[in-house]
Image: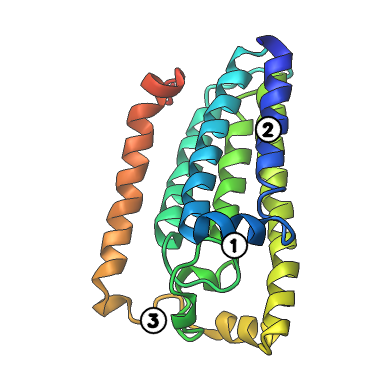
Amino acid sequence: MNGWGSFILASAAFFLSHTIPVRSSVKPWIVARIGAKGFGLIYSILSLVIFVWLIVAANRAPYVPLWEKAAWMPYVTISIMLVVCLMLSFSIARPNPFSFGGARNESFEPSSPGIVRLTRHPLLVALALWSFAHLLPNGDLSHIILFAAFGTFALLGCKMINRRTRRKMSEAGKDYDALWVATRAGSLFSGCENSPSVFLRLLGGLGLYVLLLSLHGPVIGVYVWP
């Protein structure tokens, strides 16, 4: 199926796959049968496959221009993507009891929260920045729908996760608001001078940035440099 039909089908598959499996009435049932690691692995692979399908479908949809791409627009996207890559590098696999993607959440120290001090949902904020940054140089209808939907989905996801995490912490006898107040009072750079992981995460973010710039043209078909 080509054209708008494929794009609509891919969009529906993406949003259904990111809402149904993670529902509180569905995820425990799946985890009980394939385990938490199995769920994480299958869910990650499924998300990646559908994401690629959605990008390809958007590229193949009929071209309906809504605004002209100015010469300066790609530079704005390129600049914002550096922030996105650094946010991803400093967010992945670190303690974060407020959002998804956290690792070793029981070891979270509100006095040294790192990037979590800036936002409870750094991964979702990075997704929103990626989405809205790509809106600017992609002024055709299919890509506007694609990136606007991603950005809106990320922002709505922040609110949904806030409610769910607050409920779970309350059930466990923990004070969500008190933990967030303590986190906001913590130091963004506490311990950085003695932490090699900070330097490694910085290198990882810069490396990801260079990798995306290098592969965007050969893989996506759109070369980033004007």
Q: Amino acid at mark 3?
A: Ser
For disc 2, the neighbor class at 10 Å (few under 14, some 14 to 19, many from 20) is some
First in sequence: mark 1 vs mark 3? 1
**Is residue 85 found left or right of 31 in the rendered image?**
left
Q: Where the C terminus falls, by quadrant? A: top left
Q: Which residue is mark 3?
A: 190
Relative to 161, does residue 184 appear above or below in the rendering? below
Question: How far, Cα to Cα, is label 1 from label 3?
Answer: 20 Å
The answer to whether any part of residue 62 appears in the image is no
Q: Which residue is mark 1?
A: 121
Q: Amino acid at mark 2?
A: Ala
Tell me which colouring the rendered structure shows.
rainbow
The answer to whether any part of residue 168 appears in the image is yes
Q: Which residue is mark 2?
A: 13
Q: Amino acid at mark 1?
A: His
Relative to 226, does residue 107 appear above or below in the rendering? below
Quadrant hosting residue 212: top left
Quadrant hosting residue 2: top right
Contact between marks 1 and 2 (CB within 8 A): the answer is: no
